[in-house]
Amino acid sequence: MTQHAKDWSKSSWLNFPALQQPNWPDLDEHRAVLQSISQLPPLVFAGEIRNLKKKLAQAATGDAFLLQGGDCAEDFQHCTAPSIRESLKVILQMAIVLTYAGGKPVIKVGRIAGQYAKPRSADTEIVNGIEIPSYRGDMVNSPEARLEERRPDPQRLLKGYFLAAATMNIMRAFTRGGYAALHRVDAWNQEFVKSTPMGQSYERLGKHIADAINFMQVVGIDTDTPQFNQAEFFTSHEALLLGYEEALTRQDSTTGDWYDCSAHMLWIGDRTRQLDGAHVEFFRGVLNPLGMKVGPKHDIDEIKRIITRLNPDNEAGRMTLITRFGADKVAQYLPQLAQEMKKEGLQVVWSCDPMHGNTYTAETGHKTRNFSYILQEIRSFFEIHWAEGTVPGGVHFELTGENVTECTGGGRNILDEHLQRNYQTNCDPRLNAEQSLELAFQIAEMIRS
């Protein structure tokens, strides 16, 4: 066992205050469900986790780029092969644009196969004059605004495990069974995107890739290899429900180290990263790559102490700082944060979440985000890191492959009054495939700069 984790156990978090945990009405049932999950197979494996950490170490130095994206909160009802395929498609599309046009290896990490829980600002809300528990994600309760549907149900934890396993299964099939082969880049272009300027740019890029592969085959280079026919894809989610995470934490038989095998990468939220809190205590003992969201209300000294506690050996690839300031605040907060991390010599992957800081409520009542502000924050993120001599190492999006109208702007110039056309999210608004692809081309230009 590593030195820093000698006084740690996978249940030591129980001795610390745990925020954002549901008020389970039947604690005995909750314990029984977690016991069942602890006996089930892991969703990912230690070797895969270590592989991702090595790749993230390259992103920290600018030798690779992290693309992390997916649903705000996964929906049990959308755990279907077509839905998973569409989400995978858009990430593969973005990755191929960033790799080919940006000229850098891309680490593909989905917010998928476990992103079933969400933090909330309050335990309850008032609906039609009645106080009911807040929706905390499908692994806890239902989005339906009825008291009986909002009661936290431990059986949803078990259902979440099995749906995450099903998602992992179909994703492994897609990424390793030929669907993700480079000669299929045209097949990743969604029908509703093809006729747009971004879709047409992607088609031209796909033609260049096809020509390059054909040339290699003509000159005798073997393209029948995993690099051409498979995609390496990793999973991640916010490790919010600590009982569930503990149940899937396993000791690697080859090293004796502990890994949370619910996902390859885990992140800790802006609301749960207390230095003396249960989440930090749990995280410090598992050796997965860790992300940490950092918003405008952060304290730099506390951030440094948390990083030191989670990564005392300053291991490259262990920590990713996911900044979420908003287009109007990134210039106020990011420079000093970057300066302090650099001064302390802390090895981190710098990633930009341009979604959460740019949320507003439209006149129609829909929560939304504007494409222009999302792009503006990304540009500022790159420019600030270049100015500070630090490395802009990745981006973190909430997106979907579906033709939703949840974020305004972009090539089709979705307006506030258009949001109701196909607004599907139960939580935060997501970029659709066309908007995601447009961002990928813009980011590729920044990476090459």
Image (cartoon, grey):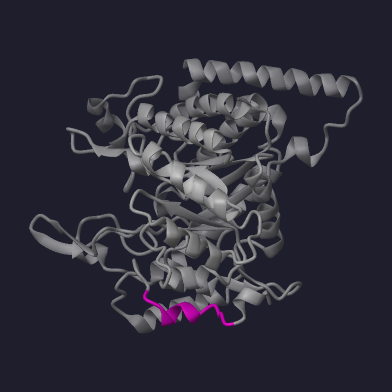
Give 78 or 343, whichever is nearer the viewer: 343
The front one of 173 and 365 is 365
Magenta includes 9? yes
Q: Is residue 189 visible?
A: no
Residue 100 on image: x %, y %: 67, 26
- Judge from the rendering whether residue 111 lies leftward or rightward of residue 371; answer left or right: right
Between residues 33 and 376, which one lies in front from this camera angle? Answer: 376
What residue appears at the point 49 percent right and 24 percent down from the top-left corner? 191
Judged by its main secondary structure, the magenta piece is loop
As for residue 142 lying within the magenta part, the answer is no
User: Is 186 above or below relative to 83?
Assistant: above
Question: Can you say which quadrant of the picture contains the C terminus?
Answer: top right
- The region drawn magenta spans 7-17
| 213 vs 428: above or below | above
The quadrant where residue 370 appears:
top left
Position of residue 54 in the picture relative to residue 363 (left or right): right
* Residue that protrudes farthest toward the right in the picture: 220
Farthest-out residue, front: 343
**Residue 89 falls left or right of residue 399:** right
Residue under the point 37% across and 33% down: 404
Q: Position of residue 59 (x, y in %)?
A: 64, 44
- Give the image location of residue 74, x and y in percent: 42, 51
